[in-house]
Amino acid sequence: MTYRVERMTPSGRIALLAGAVALGAILSMPWWASQGLIRDVITLSCFIAVAQMWNMLAGYGGLVSVGQQAFVGVGAYAMFVMAQLWGLNPFVAVGLSLLAPALLAVPIYLLLHRLEGPYFAIGTWVVAEALRLIATNTPMLNGGAGMSLRVMTQFSAHERAIAGAFLAALLLLVTVGGSYLLLRSRYGIALTAMRDNPVAARSQGVDVQRLRFLIFVAAAVGTGFAGAVYFMVQLRITPPSAFDMNWANLAIFIVMVGGIGSIEGVLIGAVIYFFADRWFGGFGASYLIVLGLLTLMTALFFREGLWGLWRRTFDAPWFPTRRTLIHTGRDTS
Amino acid sequence: MHWIEGIVQGVLLGGLYAQYALGMALMFGVMKIVNVTHGDLVILLALIGISFADFAGIGPWSVLVTLVPIGAAIGWLLQRAILNRVVGDDPLPSLIATFGLSIALQNAMLVVWSADTRSLPGGGIQQASVEIGPLFVGVLPVIVLVCATLLTGGLDAVLRFTRYGRSLRAASADVEAAAMVGVNPKAVYATATAIAVGILGFAATFQAMRSTVAPADGPFMLIYAFEAVIIGGLGSVWGAFTGAMILGISQAIGFRISPGFGILAGHLVFLAVLAIRPQGIFQRKS
């Protein structure tokens, strides 16, 4: 008997095409979109990237972090230091700044992986707080007053728009596309096994500890990338904004409401969060009460999120990772 | 002299942190969950106490007597309505649920009490101090420390010697086996959370008397409680107490080095303990 393994589905092909079109649209934005729209798309891309990295950590790695703002801040500050203080080209600095979260993630993981599940989460928060305080107390970073990216004035608005659009597209390609490629590879099978049951995965030869370490570092780099891009567009950084708890809030909200353990859920959740923030953000505290209660309700009654609900009825994944065995030959025995 | 004074101040500060940490150690020991609203509940209770003292014109000790049962009731309700649904091997649901609740709670307090910092008038006790040798020591911090010691000793005794303590230890060792021999885990859990938040009634009163509270302060208290528990070593209430002392001393000495360095010094000591002795100071390697 002969078999064929198929992974791609029609819905996946359509989604892949739509994704390519979307990336093309983002890249071409500087020639047709307004400054405001470009800024919004870059912000949304950063939200998607931070949330997808948290999804890889919590949804697949079993590593629940409430301190991803540590890497947002470190990536962004590294970019500001290289561009503003060392005089590097800002766009080159964005690329080089990714070294900082990568190098920092190694000792952080080695320290924190000793803590049990929920304590690991609070440990990441302590690290983020410690980094915020270090940034506040470092004269080179201008302490609590923060830094401005004055070097950006050497570029025209159009040049900056091109760079921003390019970085947003690259960010999505690396975080969303990279996650998808990873999940389709043989690591993806190991990750999915780990997501479903770490003990069983270990018994099947998956090196859970090593995989968790790699996921933690990769998520740190992706999150730091988002931080560098976000604050490059903001042109200004302060310790409270860079190491803002809200980065953890939004990642958790997006992933939980959209649907943990799926890339589709992150995209849905990010769009919902982005527009909720846009339309209701002005209500301040009462808006955040609703956001917090929604996160609570999702964790209590609705753990699969919106994508999970959709998937119950429609089997049409945008990012198919499931392998289907298709019988092609005749039984000749 | 400068440093001895720092250490004394640190131990006194540790008394307050021990009151934050006890409940967290208890809940983690029994249910293996962290309640992210732990710090926010300190603030909630403190704000309720301040408003109540203002409204009823009562002194801080009456506030304390009111807040402890209110805290216990809130804890019981929290367990019954939310935490019982998310207790389990997977740490994600309990973390996310309480994380969401923490955001909601902080902002609800912001709506009700505004962002102002408030404190509880103590009728002059805040200013009182006694001279011990060359040092002046505040009366209130000493009361806080004595209270923390009594609470730790009391909790330890309850866990060791009472019927409830036995069922609680049984449930934390193996919840299914405990259920088989007649322990009702949900009741044990509800009582544990009620005790944990009840103790926060003490913490809230003293926090509001010693310094100020504002709706956004909760996360810091959660972090201090957590650091104390980890430094001391999981699973022991005296460990949490000692961890709180070490944290208090680290912060007090840090503040003496530079005012911006105090809190950071606490974080760094926490990370150093994690690097050198991850099982905590008082826990034997398992």
Image: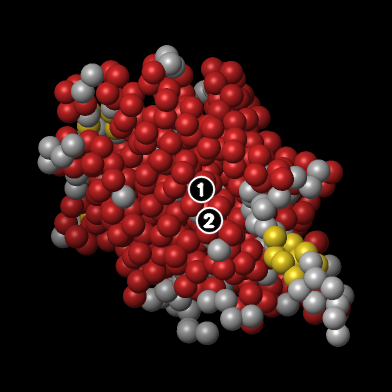
Q: Position of residue B25 (x, y in %)?
A: 56, 64
- Residue A274 position (above or below residue A169): above
| Residue linked to disc 1 | A177
The quarter of the displayed image where residue A202 is located: bottom right
* Residue A193 position within the rendered picture, expressed as x and y whole percent measured from the top left: 65, 68
Mark number, residue B203? none
The quadrant in which residue A95 appears is top left
Asked if disc 1 and disc 2 are in contact, CB closer than 8 Å, the reply is yes
Q: Which residue is mark 2?
A: A181
Residue A148 pos. (x, y %): 22, 28
- Quarter in which the N terminus of chain B is drawn: bottom left
Q: What residue is rendered at 54% in x and 73% in y?
A: A208
Which of A79 and B212 lies nearest the eye of the viewer? A79
Q: Are marks 1 and 2 on the same chain?
A: yes
Left/right placement of residue B162 relative to residue A105 reads right
Q: Amino acid at mark 1?
A: Gly
Q: Residues within 10 Å of mark 1 (few under 14, many from 20)?
A: some
Who is closer to the viewer here, A151 or A7? A7
Vertical side of A294 occupied by B37: above or below: below
Q: Position of residue B48 (x, y in %)?
A: 61, 33
